């Protein structure tokens, strides 16, 4: 079984057993030179699917170019991994940046099929696509909390919830100024 086969199998397993799958993914010893190209690939696929989703929903306009979205996505994903590793250490966690980034890549890869389903739903019923999005987001938050628990070796989910919330707030406050577009009436000179 190749590394890719092992990762795919654990990604599927993570739907049912996220914490155990995350621990097994971390035990694979995936090299850094595999994680960075995987992050770029997942980011490109996410931006492509997001662009398709915006095109499928009537009356929604894309507010940024795909390249800008890609750069933003890569910065947020890598920044979130870095912050997850630091905040986890404050809570006596054992995770590091490389492992956090690997789990973020796996989590984002797990979201890809759900996004593809959402694009298909949006073609027929935008409302149903939005409901599906809410369900996926809630479930992926649960998966992410379990991934953080496995990453840092937490025995309970309480510290994983705290680490996830704190890291999310930090990333949000850092990224928020970049998410906003230019002020109305202000032209780019």
Image (cartoon, helix red, strand yellow):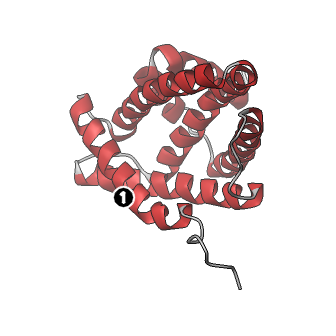
The C terminus, quarter of image: bottom right
Q: Residue at x 42, y 51 (%)?
A: 96
Q: Quadrant of residue 182?
A: bottom right
Which residue is farthest bottom?
Answer: 189
Q: Residue at x 34, y 41 (%)?
A: 152
Query: Of helix, strand and loop, which one carries label 1?
Result: helix
- Left or right placement of residue 123 versus residue 30 in this view: right
The N terminus, quarter of image: top right
Q: Closest to the observer: 168 or 94?
A: 168
Q: Is residue 155 visible?
A: no
Image coords of residue 49 (percent x, y):
74, 37
Image coords of residue 91 (percent x, y):
22, 48
Q: As displayed, is residue 27 above or below residue 87?
A: above
Which residue is farthest front?
Answer: 185
Which residue is farthest top?
Answer: 16
Residue at the disc numbered 1? 170
Q: Closest to the observer: 40 or 173?
A: 173
Q: Residue at x 70, y 58 (%)?
A: 64
Q: Is residue 97 visible?
A: yes
Image coords of residue 106 (percent x, y):
58, 34
Q: Residue at x 69, y 80 (%)?
A: 188
Image coords of residue 93 (percent x, y):
29, 45
Q: As displayed, is residue 140 above or below residue 73?
A: above
- Left or right placement of residue 68 versus residue 80 in this view: right
Q: Quadrant of residue 142?
A: top left
């Amino acid at each position: 079984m190749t590394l890719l086969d092992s990762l795919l199998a654990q990604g599927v397993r993570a739907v049912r057993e996220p914490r155990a799958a995350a621990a097994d993914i971390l035990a694979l010893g995936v090299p850094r030179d595999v994680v960075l190209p995987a992050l770029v690939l997942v980011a490109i696929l996410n931006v492509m699917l997001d662009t398709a989703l915006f095109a499928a929903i009537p009356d929604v306009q894309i507010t940024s170019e795909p390249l800008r979205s890609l750069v933003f996505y890569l910065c947020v994903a890598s920044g979130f991994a870095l912050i997850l590793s630091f905040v986890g250490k404050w809570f006596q966690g054992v995770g590091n940046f490389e492992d956090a980034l690997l789990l973020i890549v796996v989590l984002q890869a797990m979201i890809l099929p759900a996004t593809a389903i959402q694009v298909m739903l949006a073609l027929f019923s935008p409302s149903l696509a939005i409901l599906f999005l809410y369900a996926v987001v809630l479930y992926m938050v649960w998966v992410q909390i379990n991934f953080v628990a496995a990453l840092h070796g937490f025995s309970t989910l309480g510290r994983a919830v705290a680490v996830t919330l704190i890291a999310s707030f930090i990333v949000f406050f850092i990224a928020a100024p970049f998410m906003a577009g230019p002020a109305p009436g202000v032209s780019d000179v």
